[in-house]
Image (spheres, rainbow, N blue to C red):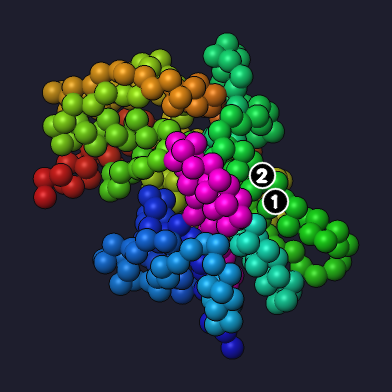
Amino acid sequence: MRKKATLITGAAGEVGQALVERVVEQNNTHVISMDIKPLPPELDAKVQHIVGDILDHSLFDRIVSRYDITHIYHLAALLSTSAEYSPMLAHNVNVGGTMRLLQLAAEQSEWKREPVIFIFPSSVAAFGMDSLENKAANPRPEEWEWNKPITMYGCNKLYGETLGIYYSNHYQQLAENEPTMLDFRCVRYPGLISAFTVPSGGTSDYGPEMLHAAAQGKAYASFVRKDAAISFMAMPDAVGSVIQLANAPRENLTRQIYNITAFSLTAEEFAAHVKEHFPDAEITYNPDISRQRIIDSWPIDMNDDAARRDWGWDPEYDAEKAFSEYLVPNIRKRYEK
Ligand code: SER
């Protein structure tokens, strides 16, 4: 019999590392992690890590021949700024990789007559506000509003969501009583902030970058204006959310795509939190036009009422608590070493 396992792609990324740690802690499943990069050694020792390309067919064939994949957390992606530099590569990885895994999950679900739970982190980038006036007038869009992304990454994520809905409800137009479909569940993340890793290639990175710079006593010039506003979330809430969604009873879920958010800040408010803990922090503003445009197209906040109602989404960290209890203490330790 094949051994049951959870597959985590993009495991060496920011969310990936934190998620692998948390899923392993739960200790109730064998974890297979994948990434084009190796995992840090202390994490690598805890899982079966495969270094490989998400677009490599044979890798997945080998995995499913040995393991019964019950859950997939598909995190592998190029983020929004990177994707603007390499749109073709971003499309191949973000769309091609998602398509391949959805196909695999659909086939496995059908074959074993039990749905594979497929968790897909989408993003605030799936939204596209067309002006600052509309951004201000529509601060908390619902999941289906303003779905007009202006980035390659946002387009890829929105299509990934659509493909997930297709594979879980309409694949080959099978009737409802025909083979079991996969169970696709998706969250739209805001900007994420980790105390343990520094992001790369994202557009919300100015937040975490200013904090990590301050902790190292380095000056930081933000690539967006003071008044740039989006929502953020601390990494423990980000990984907790997808585990919570994966464990939610299916009958409670009234939709497949859920906005989730924790706190909304302007860059200046973000800097004020940083300065509260690092009073000598030197933070200036030197907006990059392209990255500013991207942030201007993302909503100030998102309406996450459905996630709160359907599966009990309730972030542990608001801004104050995120800085004082999670980010600052851990970041201080990190740079003291
Ligand atoms: N944090 C991501 C980015 O900036 C958005 O999902 O690309």
Q: Is residue 307 visible?
A: no
Give the residue type at disc 1.
Leu
Residue wearing tag 1: 163
Circles 2 and 1, Cβ within 8 Å, touching? The answer is: yes
Q: Residues within 10 Å of mark 2 (few under 14, many from 20)?
A: some
Please report the bounds of the magenta region as a residue range: 69-98
Mark 1 residue element: helix
Magenta residue check for 72? yes
Residue at image position (59%, 29%) is 150
Residue at image position (70%, 51%) is 163
Q: State which quadrant residue 263 falls in.
A: top left
Q: How many marks?
A: 2
Mark 2 residue element: helix
- Residue 103: mark: none
For this rendering, which residue is in front, 317 or 181? Answer: 181
Q: State which quadrant residue 270 falls in.
A: top left
- In this view, the residue farthest toward the top is 133
